[in-house]
Amino acid sequence: MHWKTINKLIGNIDLYWLDFILKGNLEDDAKILDAGCGEGRNLFYCMQTGYDVFGVDQNPEAIMFLKLMAKQFNVTDIDARFQVMDLAKLRFPDESFDVIINSAVLHFAESQTHFMQMLSECVRVLKPDGKLFMRTMADKGLDNSGENNIADNKKRFLLNENLLQHFYNIYGLEFLEIPKYVVVGNVRTMGTFAFKKIKNG
């Protein structure tokens, strides 16, 4: 199959999100929230194949672009589905979604408290047995650690092992698979995590 044909099917999807999909983690009737969706690269395939999708981001221009893309796929209720929203204050009821995408967003947290607020909101709106796909910068494989470290000459929050275990325990989550860590250019490490929300967590 030609690469242009593949691109037409899946767009510029995050490869780790694609891996999550290919492992059968999306039920046909899954209701999906991309928390920090940007222009919707990780929703392209889901919209094209008819999933029940929602996306929120703090960038109004990104949401505007996503709405235009959604119209091409005849997505209904676009204004309700795609909104400018603060991830630390999601305006959705508890247990609304089967799957939540949070890709390359949490490392923009201003502090550990802010990080936990955003993550807590994602878990709150996730249904019992729901799945959380999370990709964020971490302190593995590099000499720096802790919060608000410098990476790519910009301020970033780095997830560490203690914090990972902390929210894993308090939010009633379990790993769907072993976390993956990739060192990029010896300047940052990206961690990829797949969780399931335990029913009585």
Image (spheres, rainbow, N blue to C red):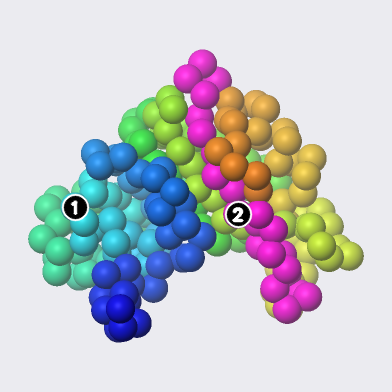
Residue 182 is one of the magenta-drawn residues? yes
Give the residues drawn in magenta, as a range: 180-201
The x and y percentages for residue 183 are 73, 68
Q: Which residue lies furthest to the top in this view?
A: 200
Name the amino acid type tagged 1: Gly
User: Would you name the residue on which mark 2 appears?
Assistant: 192
86 or 191: which is nearer to us?
191
Compared to residue 113, the image places residue 47 above or below, namely below
At horizontal 81% and vertical 54% (from top left) the residue drawn is 146
The x and y percentages for residue 169 are 67, 27
User: Would you name the residue on which mark 1 appears?
Assistant: 50
Q: Quadrant of residue 24?
A: top left
Residue 174 is one of the magenta-drawn residues? no
Determine the main secondary structure of the stretch shown in magenta: strand
* In the image: residue 183, left or right of residue 197: right
Helix, strand or loop at mark 2: strand
Q: Which residue lies furthest to the right in this view?
A: 143
User: Which of pointers 2 and 1 lies earlier in the amino acid sequence?
Assistant: 1
Tell me how far mark 2 sits from mark 1, CA to CA.
26 Å
The x and y percentages for residue 157 are 70, 58
For disc 2, the neighbor class at 10 Å (few under 14, some 14 to 19, many from 20) is many
Name the amino acid type tagged 2: Thr
